[in-house]
Image (tube, grey):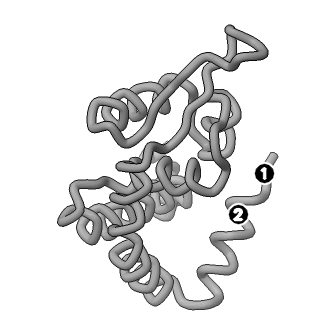
């Protein structure tokens, strides 16, 4: 059997295309947020905390679609910069609550117009149908 023929369908792999698209989208957001000293992962964490208030690390990781280890690594930089803080829950010392600081809220707020420009650029690249499909896929578990 000819391996080239057997694997020819792999040239149009949707998983590979989606990973490549995700890297491209991340690059757009990072480029817009760079003047504010933020990456999109940091901005997203700060914005989520601003919306939710103090949140257990596990719940925050789940809402962001991150594993806890990745979130913890990202939080350490936010804490070093004074943008977020982690403390033990008063009711359960095993639970660590994360919150955005005033400094973190301010930097996220100042970066919001840049995030909006990135959002508009990405939405324009995908088009209305693509945005709707992306949102559907993000909220659907495929089997």
Q: Dot 2, crowdedness within 10 Å: few (<14), some or many (≥20)?
A: few
Residue 4 seen in the current view: no
Res 122 → quadrant: bottom left
- 1 or 2: mark nearer the eye: 2
Residue 129 left/right relative to 23: right
* Residue 74 badge: none
Which residue is label 1 attached to?
142
Residue at the spot x=68%, y=60% of the render?
A: 138
SS type, badge 1: loop
Please provide percent x and percent y for residue 99. Answer: 54, 38
Residue 25's place in the image compared with 142, above or below, is below
Q: Residue furthest top?
A: 93
Pick the front one: 43 or 123: 43
Please provide percent x and percent y for residue 139. Answer: 75, 59
CB atoms of marks 1 and 2 within 8 Å? yes
Q: Dot 1, crowdedness within 10 Å: few (<14), some or many (≥20)?
A: few
């Amino acid at each position: 059997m000819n391996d080239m023929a057997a694997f020819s369908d792999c040239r149009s792999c949707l998983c590979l295309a989606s990973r490549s698209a995700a890297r491209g989208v991340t690059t757009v957001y990072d480029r817009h947020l760079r003047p504010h000293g933020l990456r999109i992962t940091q901005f997203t964490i700060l914005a989520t905390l601003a919306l939710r208030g103090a949140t257990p690390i596990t719940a925050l990781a789940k809402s962001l679609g991150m594993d806890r280890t990745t979130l913890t690594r990202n939080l350490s930089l936010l804490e070093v910069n004074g943008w977020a803080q982690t403390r033990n829950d008063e009711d359960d010392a095993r639970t660590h609550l994360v919150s955005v600081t005033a400094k973190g809220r301010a930097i996220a707020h100042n970066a919001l117009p840049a995030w909006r420009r990135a959002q508009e650029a990405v939405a324009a690249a995908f088009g209305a149908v693509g945005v709707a499909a992306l949102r559907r896929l993000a909220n659907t578990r495929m089997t």
